[in-house]
Image (cartoon, grey):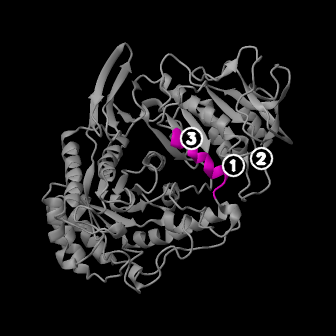
Amino acid sequence: MNKDIVLNGVHIGEHGFDPDKVIDEIYERCVKPGLNFVTIRPGYMGRRIPIPQHYFIEWAKYMAENKIYFIFLYTIQHAPDGRESHFDKETVDKMREIAGEYYIGDMIGETGSSFACKLAGYFNRGEARGTDTTQITEYPDMKAAHEGYVADVSKYIEIDKKLGVPAIVSVEATGLNKYNAEAGVTIPMLELMCGSPDVLVSSLRGVARAYDSEMWGTYVAHEWYGGMRHDDILKRKRLELAYKYAYLAGTNALCLESGDELVSAYGYNFKADSELCGEYRKVMCDMMDYIKSDKRPVGGPKVKVAFVSGRHDAYGGWGGSSIWNQFDREEWGHSDAEHSWRILDEIGTKRTWNDIANFGDTDFSAAPAYGMYDIVPIEADAEHLLRYDYLIFLGWNSMTEEDMDKLYEYVNRGGRLLMSAAHLNTSTVRNGEFSPVSEEKIKKLFGCSFTEKSISSNAGIKFRYTSLDENAVYPGSRDLFCDPIYSAGYVNWAEFELCGGVETALLTDAFVPDKALLPAVIENKVGDGVATLVTALDYPGKASLLPLYRAIVRELVTASARKADIRVIGSDRLRWSVYEGDKVYLLNTDYDMPITVKLIKGEKETTVTLDSLELKSVQI
C-alpha cells in the first residue's frame, strides 16, 4: 500500500513581514522543528509592501535546498499599487526552474467570504487594512450571482495563468470551493475553523474529488477561529483536535497560520516564549511526528454518502453570512433552502433514545458508512457521483434537464437518491414562482407526474412498513392503522399522480388508512437503484417540513452504516474514517473522558479504548 503524502508547516507573514528575515524565520519555524511546508504572505494584514524580485528567487532556492514545499499567498489581492501581482513572469519561471516540485503554486485569498458572504464595509476603513475588497453587486437572480462570483475569482486566476505559476490554490473560509474550482482553482484549501469542520472539510473533500484535484489542504487559522479566549483550556485542546480531525479526514497539507510565533488577536498579546505559543508549537510538531510514523494509504477516506450542493447554492457555512453578498435585500437572507443545511449539524450525533425512527439490534445512527460523508457539487459528472451509494439534496437547487439526465444515470446504475419537489424547480429567482423541470424527466426518474395542483396542509405523515431500499427502515405500519406523525405546521405539498412510482408515505390527518390526502413520499425503482421524492414544494429547512425530511435523511445515513463491511459502535464523540486496506482511524473528540469503540468486520470484533483527544489507527 503506497503511503499518502502529507505536508505540515507554517505561515510566514501573519503578524509582520521583513524580507531580509524571511529565510531566518523559515529556518527557525520550519526547518529546525522538522516541518516540510511553508506559505509566504508578502506583506501582512493587508499592508502592501513592494518586494524586490530577487527575494522570491532566494527564498525558492533556500526551500528547495532544504526540501521544503511552499506556496505564496495574497500575491495578487495585496499586490503593490499599480501592479497585478507581487511576481513577474521571469521570477515565476526562475522559481520553477530552481525549486521544481517544491514550488506548489500561488494561493488566492478568501474569495468566498469576501464575494459571497460579507456586507459592504465589512473590514475596518482606513489605511491599516488596505483597500476593502468586498464587492457588492445587486444581482437579479441566483444564476447571475453565481456567474458574477466566478467572474470575480477568474480575474485573479487569469493573472496567475499569465505568470505561469505551477498550480492555482485557494484558501477558502467557506463551503464555496466548488465555485473556485469552476473558476480554475486546481488545489483547494480550507481555512479551519471558520465553520463546522465536519461540514466544511466534507465540502472541500467532495469538491477535490469532483474536480480530480491532485491534493487538498487545511489552513489552521486557530488564533482567529479556534475560539475568542486564547487562555481558555478548551481552545488549546481544540487546536489538537483540529489537526487530528483534518488528518483522519484526508488532508494532504496542514498549515498553521499563526500562534507558534505570536498570538495577538482579540486584545491578547502572547510572545513566542510564552506558554501558549509553546503549546501551539508542540501540537504542530507532535502532528509532524505522527505523520512521519504513520503510513496513511493514498486515495483519502472511503465515503458512501454524499450531500448534494445544488446549482447556484450559496450557503457558505460561515458565521455572519448573507447569500451572494446581498445583505440589504430581505429575500436574499438565509431562509428555508439554506436552513436545510442545519440537518448536517446532527450527523455525527446519535439519535436520542426515545426516537421511534431508530431501528435495529445495534444503534448505527451516529454516522454514515465508514464514518465520513462528502458534500458533492451537482456540477460533478455521473462517474464521480457513482462513487457514492447515497445522494441527498440539501440547500438551494435550480434544476436543469442535464442534471436530471445525470441523476437518472446515477440511480439506474445503483444509486439511492433523495430530494424534495423544491429541488425540481428550474427557477433561479429568490421567492420566484415554482417552475418544475420537464414532466418527462420527472416521470422517468421518480415514476410520477406533477399535476400543477398543490395544497397547504398541517396534516401528518404515515409511512408504509417497507421501503424499496432494502436497507432503509421507516417508522411505518403494515396496515396503516396508526397515528400520523411529523405534523409540525403548514407545508405546501405538490399533487403528483403515480405512473410507476409507489407511495412510501401518505399525507393524512386520520387514524384510518383510507383518508390519505396526497402521497408525501414517492419511491421509484430505476434500474438497480431507488429514487425518493418528498413531494413538498418547500425546501426541507422549513420548520414544519424539517422533522419529516430529517427523519428520512437520518434513516438513509443509518442504512448506509448497517450494510457497510466495516461497522463501528461507540460514543458520538467519536470521529472515524476508513482507508483502503481496511485501515481505520479513530479520534476521540471528547475533551475530558476516554471512550470505548467496537469495530466489526464479518465475524471479527475488535475493541479499542481511546483517551480524550487521542487519534489511533487500527489495521483490521
Cα gap from disc 1 to disc 3, whole angstroms: 15 Å
Task: Spot the residue most to the left.
Answer: 32
Would residue 595 appear left or right of 472 to someone viewing this image? left
Residue 150 is tagged as none
Q: Are marks 3 and 2 in contact (CB under 8 Å)?
A: no
Question: As rendered, which of 310 and 11 lies closer to the eye?
Answer: 11
Residue 71 at what x, y percent from top left?
30, 64
Whole-percent x and y of residue 351? 53, 30
Tell me the number on the disc at residue 399.
Answer: 1
Q: Quadrant of the C terminus?
A: top left
Q: In the image, which residues are magenta?
A: 334-346
How dense is the environment of label 2, judged by Cα within 10 Å: few (below 14), some, or many (20 and up)? many
Q: Is residue 85 left or right of residue 404?
A: left
Residue under the image location 61 percent in, 36 percent down = 550
Q: Amino acid at mark 2?
A: Pro
Q: Is residue 610 left or right of residue 312?
A: left
In this rendering, the answer to whether 323 lies above or below 436 is below
For this orientation, the residue located farthest to the bottom is 82
Q: Earlier in the sequence, mark 3 or mark 2?
A: 3
Residue 509, position as x, y percentages in the image: 81, 29
Q: Amino acid at mark 1?
A: Met
Location of mark 2 (residue):
436
Q: Residues within 10 Å of mark 1 (few under 14, many from 20)?
A: many
Tell me whether the residue at label 2 lies in contact with that at label 1, contact meaning CB atoms closer than 8 angstroms: yes
Q: Position of residue 243 (x, y in %)?
A: 31, 48
Q: Give the secondary structure at mark 3.
A: helix
Residue drawn where x is 77% and y is 35% of the image = 443
Residue 34 to residue 414: above or below = below
Which residue does the numbered mark 3 point to in the structure image?
382
Q: Is residue 130 above or below residue 503?
A: below
Mark 3: amino acid: Ala
